[in-house]
Image (tube, rainbow, N blue to C red):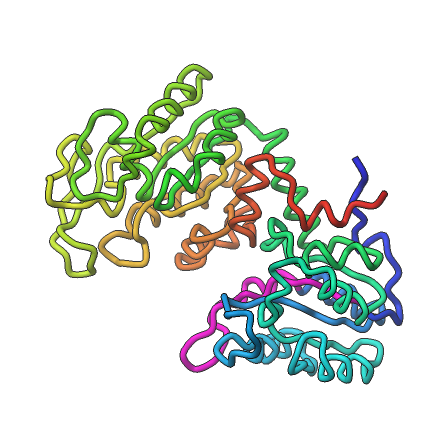
Amino acid sequence: MARVQTISDGDFSGKKVLVRVDFNAPVDDSGAVSDDTRLRAALPTINALLDQGAQVILMSHRGRPSGTGFEESYSLAPIAARLGELLDRDIVLAEDIVGPSAQAAIAAMGDGDVVLLENLRFDAREKKNDPEFAQALAALAEVYVNDAFGTAHRAHASTAGVAAYLPAYAGYLMEREVDTLSSMLDTPKRPFVAILGGSKVSDKIQVIDALIEKADAILIGGGMCFTFIASQGESVGTSLMEADWVEQSAAMMQKAAQRGVEFLLPVDVVVADRFAEDAEIQTVSVDQIPADMMGLDIGPETAELYGRVIGGAGSVFWNGPMGVFEMAPFEAGTKAVAYAVAANKDADTIIGGGDSVAAVNKYDLADQMAFVSTGGGASMELVEGKALPGVEALRSE
């Protein structure tokens, strides 16, 4: 297979370099970036290009604007402000993407300057991978670098289309994400333990299927555990449960058993009479869930059981919380798993993006994990064995 060139292979001195980054960061009510993890993740690539004297043109999306033009609530202005602080230099924010403002800002650039284009998704052609839009982006620069692993599973103009018109390279973040996740899946240290949470089995079915082929143990939590519990003949009360997936969930557990993969479900759960911070709560065995209550977290016995399995792992991959960890009464399971993963210093621990990253950040444990992925959807598709359009577009002939 054709290889992916990385920025280590290129000479960017004095060149205009168009860099796709993932700056889809949350902004608080004051208009400030509240979590700059994704901005910091892109700094090694940006600084490497600036150190070479490149003219760096950054592009990203943020949120889900309508695609009909500028929307102030989705502007990258807060991103530009925070990035300027992180880089300790002025960031010029263009008022458009490929229009007069962007063209003027880029024409005025000198070596070592940084321009940030406005939100790519203000133009509907971005998500459609429109060739005309991809060519317009390419016309802004001489070289293209993709460092946005979080969007690598999307075949958009900025992630896939533009690579057809410029010499294309992977940034350091993209390179590290793909190499780390691929090596863990191909040659994991054993035992390999996968922890999967989240709300729906239907969202994770392909991931679970792929991990049954690779893992030694799979620990299930989150809302989707109730579909599996139902597949074992238990009543789950008013818990989230996908009736259409009960039969397939049972089949997946049978497949795991046939392959000798330990497939663990909760033995106890925290239930509530309603989805609220001040709900009436109980901790019950999974075979005693009241008919009028819903499960919103794994229980303490399950957390202890999962902790023991995690503690003996050689590799750990975690994607998805164990419960509604945003609410204090239902965070104990996710917190216990996060601490268990962090405590296993001998394991290769990978946090597979999404809410799992939010959890380890909430408990200030990110620096105790071997690798924290910036891409939930992209990391999941890589686990599934799918080709990522943003990576494939970088492959040289």
Counting from the top left corner in percent of width and height, residue 292 is at: 10, 44
**13 to the left or right of 235:** right
- Given residues 279 and 143, the one toward you in this image is 143
Q: Residue at x 74, y 53 (%)?
A: 170
Q: Report x, y in % for residue 279.
A: 14, 57
How many tags in the picture? 0
Q: How far from the left and from the top, in percent, is residue 247?
A: 32, 26
Residue 31 versus residue 159 in the image, above or below: below
229 lies above or below 370: above
At a point 26% along the width and 58% down the height, the residue shown is: 328
- Judged from this view, the residue extending furthest toward the top is 258
**Which residue shows up at 18% across the image and 44% down it?**
238
Quadrant for residue 195, please give it. Answer: top left
- 19 part of magenta stretch: yes
**Who is closer to the viewer here, 19 or 284?**
19
Rendered location of residue 43, percent (x, y)? 67, 65
Q: Residue 77, relative to residue 329: is it above or below?
A: below
**Which stretch did the figure color magenta?**
17-42
Query: In the visual, does 181 lie left or right of 192?
Result: right
Q: Is residue 362 magenta?
A: no
In the image, what residue occupies the spot 20% across and 60% down?
277
Quarter holding the C terminus is: top right
